[in-house]
Image (cartoon, grey):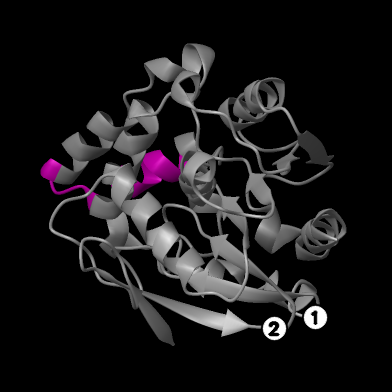
């Protein structure tokens, strides 16, 4: 493991894998860097992968104050630590971080898999408050269940093979704060993104994230959209070869 120090003094840990042009991978809310394990073998022959634990989980530290701006500063620190100008791939909340950072960050290309952005009627979500209410009531498992089912588009979390024994119950507070950041973010305030952008979506993914991809495709000037049949929000784990092929082709 290697580390970089972010603007607020928080140390962000990351793995470096592969050979080639630099590519930073940013994971989603309930995950850590290990969510990219299935995808890494499909990228490492073409890219030098920088795979961090985002702040507040895994081997990374957490700051005393949280905001989306702190996550953007973490990404800037990672980008400054690589040789050359990196590309960035963000999944889910990692996609929101990458998108929010992109206008003021020097990157070659941007890839977003169903970034956690709310548009239209979905902006009325109060998921963060409902998760916090359950957490305050001592219902940690129910708080996380709300997130997985509503934000992740899972009809019944109890049908997942890892629930509840491997559920990241220790991260619920982190997931709540990131969910609140999603609810506060508006793409109408997004400045111009100059980097060529690839938007990925699973046709079985959550409606609100597919709608976000559609809204972003209309807003971004240099954009390509690839939908994956028979794949949901976790295509990086369920269809890593297809996702890897799309990334390698786009990154060139």
Image quarter where the C terminus lies is: bottom right
Residue shown at 69% from the left, 24% from the top = 214
Of residues 204 and 141, which is closer to you in this image?
Answer: 204
Q: Quadrant of residue 3?
A: bottom left
Residue shown at 25% from the left, 71% from the top = 61
Magenta residue check for 148: yes
Residue shown at 58% from the left, 65% from the top = 24
Magenta region, residue range: 136-149
Picture disc at residue 45: 1
Magenta residue check for 170: no
Q: Is residue 153 above or below residue 245?
A: above
Q: Earlier in the sequence, mark 2 or mark 1?
A: 2
Q: Is residue 202 visible?
A: yes
Q: Position of residue 229 (x, y in %)?
A: 84, 42
Residue shown at 36% from the left, 75% from the top = 4
Disc 2 + disc 1, Cβ < 8 Å: yes
Picture disc at residue 18: 2
Picture disc at residue 118: none
Q: Is residue 241 above or below residue 183?
A: below
From the image, give the main secondary structure of the stretch colored magenta.
helix
Which element type, helix, strand or loop, lies under badge 1? loop
Tell me if mark 1 has few (under 14), some (14-19) or many (20+) residues whose alpha carbon lies within 10 angstroms of its own: some
Which element type, helix, strand or loop, lies under badge 2? loop
Q: Position of residue 216 (x, y in %)?
A: 64, 27
């Amino acid at each position: 493991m290697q580390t970089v120090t972010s603007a607020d003094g928080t140390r962000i840990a990351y793995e470096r894998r592969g050979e080639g042009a630099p590519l930073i991978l940013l994971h989603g809310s309930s995950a850590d860097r290990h969510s990219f394990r299935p995808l890494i073998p499909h990228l490492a022959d073409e890219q030098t992968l920088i795979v961090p634990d985002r702040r507040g989980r895994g081997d990374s530290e957490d700051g005393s104050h949280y905001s989306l701006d702190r996550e953007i500063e973490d990404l800037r620190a990672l980008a400054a630590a690589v040789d050359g100008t990196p590309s960035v791939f963000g999944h889910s909340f990692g996609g929101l971080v990458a998108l929010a950072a992109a206008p003021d960050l020097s990157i070659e290309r941007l890839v977003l898999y169903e970034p956690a952005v709310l548009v239209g009627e979905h902006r009325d979500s109060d998921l963060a408050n409902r998760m916090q209410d359950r957490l305050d009531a001592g219902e940690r498992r129910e708080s996380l269940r709300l997130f997985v089912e509503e934000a992740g588009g899972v009809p019944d979390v109890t049908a997942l093979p890892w629930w509840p024994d491997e559920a990241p119950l220790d991260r619920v507070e982190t997931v709540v704060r990131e969910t609140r950041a999603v609810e506060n973010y508006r793409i109408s305030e997004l400045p111009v993104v100059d980097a060529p952008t690839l938007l990925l979506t699973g046709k079985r993914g959550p409606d609100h994230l597919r709608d976000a991809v559609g809204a972003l495709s209309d807003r971004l000037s240099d954009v390509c959209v690839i939908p994956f049949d028979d794949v949901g929000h976790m295509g990086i784990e369920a269809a890593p070869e297809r996702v890897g092929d799309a990334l390698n082709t786009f990154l060139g």
